[in-house]
Image (cartoon, rainbow, N blue to C red):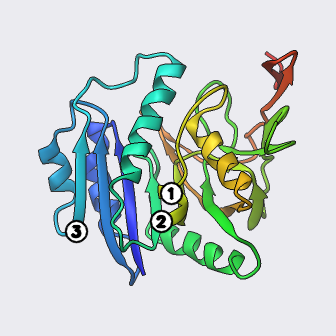
Amino acid sequence: MHITIVLPLTRKLRIPRIKEDIRAIKTEHKISLVAISDSNTISVGMLEDLCKGYDAKVYSFNRPGASDINISARRARISEVFNKARTMIPADADMVFCVEDDTELRPDYLEKLLAVYKTMSLKDNVGIVSGVQPGRWGFKMIGAWKADDIDEPTVLQTVPYQKDGLVDYIDAAGLYCFVTSRENFCNTEFYYNSFGPDVNFGLELRRKGLKNFIDWTVNAGHVTPSRTLYVDQECVVVKYVKIDGQWQLVNPKV
């Protein structure tokens, strides 16, 4: 099997660790890399060094980082990065493994997610299999979502913490650490509206009749400047409800 790892990069200081983590992945499958810089602090040369020893494609948008822009502009840039990645996946790749640069990548994550994908594919058409990771914007919540209706959702909420969870059905997840088929990745557009490109990507796969899953055993740490956050009992359920055409946060109360 040929797996392409997609690496969207904005954090220059994380590159040495990412370079180590990629080389520590435990797998017998062929690995290729797609590395995309969305910050002019990360040069093409740095991308090439990161990918040294692998079949790889690199690209730089060569623009200032997105840390100080508003949420809509940030979502637009994330969509642009992932849509660029869709055009760079090798034609002979079978699977795509996406890992954001603030995700703690452990050696067994890829094989764990692939195993769930294979198992679930025996009975379902699978979209993505994702790890779990806490968000760090506003609330500590799990970056995996369920909707009341995949075509015209009026309720969107994160999944509650499960201490002994294994695999669960979801509608969408963050783009932090997931596997999917090349066909799913390359043939599904990333875009934003009231939701970010992560939620829309998951919902689009669901609209195609596919099912998405999370693997609770892949507790992918969210690396911040001060510490690494993990999914635990402190995670709250975040719920949005569409009221009079507008999405409103109803839980937790603010």
Q: Residue at the location (49% across, 69% down)?
A: 110
Q: Is residue 232 visible?
A: yes
Pointer 2 local density, CA inside 10 Å: few below 14, some 14–19, many at least 20: many
Measured as percent of width and height from the top left, residue 234 is found at: 73, 40
Point out the image quarter for the C terminus: top right
Q: Residue at the location (51% across, 29% down)?
A: 75
Q: Relative to residue 146, is residue 211 depicted above or below?
A: below
Q: Nearer the viewer, residue 3 or 226?
A: 3
Which residue, given by chain and number where applicable, does mark 1 sit on?
A: 185
In what element is the residue under mark 3?
loop
Measured as percent of width and height from the top left, residue 219 is found at: 60, 57
Q: Nearer the viewer, residue 146 or 93?
A: 93
Pointer 1 local density, CA inside 10 Å: few below 14, some 14–19, many at least 20: many
Q: State which tag comes first along the sequence, 3 or 1.
A: 3
In what element is the residue under mark 2?
helix
Q: Relative to residue 245, is residue 192 depicted above or below?
A: below
Q: Which mark is residue 182?
A: 2
Q: Residue at the location (67% across, 25% down)?
A: 194
Tell me the CA gap for discs 2 and 3. 18 Å
Asked if labels 1 and 3 touch by Cβ distance under 8 angstroms, the answer is: no
Which residue, given by chain and number where applicable, does mark 3 sit on?
A: 54
In what element is the residue under mark 1?
helix
Q: Amino acid at mark 1?
A: Phe
Tell me the CA gap for discs 2 and 1. 5 Å
Q: Amino acid at mark 2?
A: Arg
Q: Relative to residue 137, is residue 9 depicted above or below?
A: below
Left or right, 165 with respect to 66, comes to right
Q: Nearer the viewer, residue 20 or 182?
A: 182
Asked if labels 1 and 2 touch by Cβ distance under 8 angstroms, the answer is: yes
Q: Which mark is residue 121?
A: none
Q: Nearer the viewer, mark 2 or mark 3?
A: 2
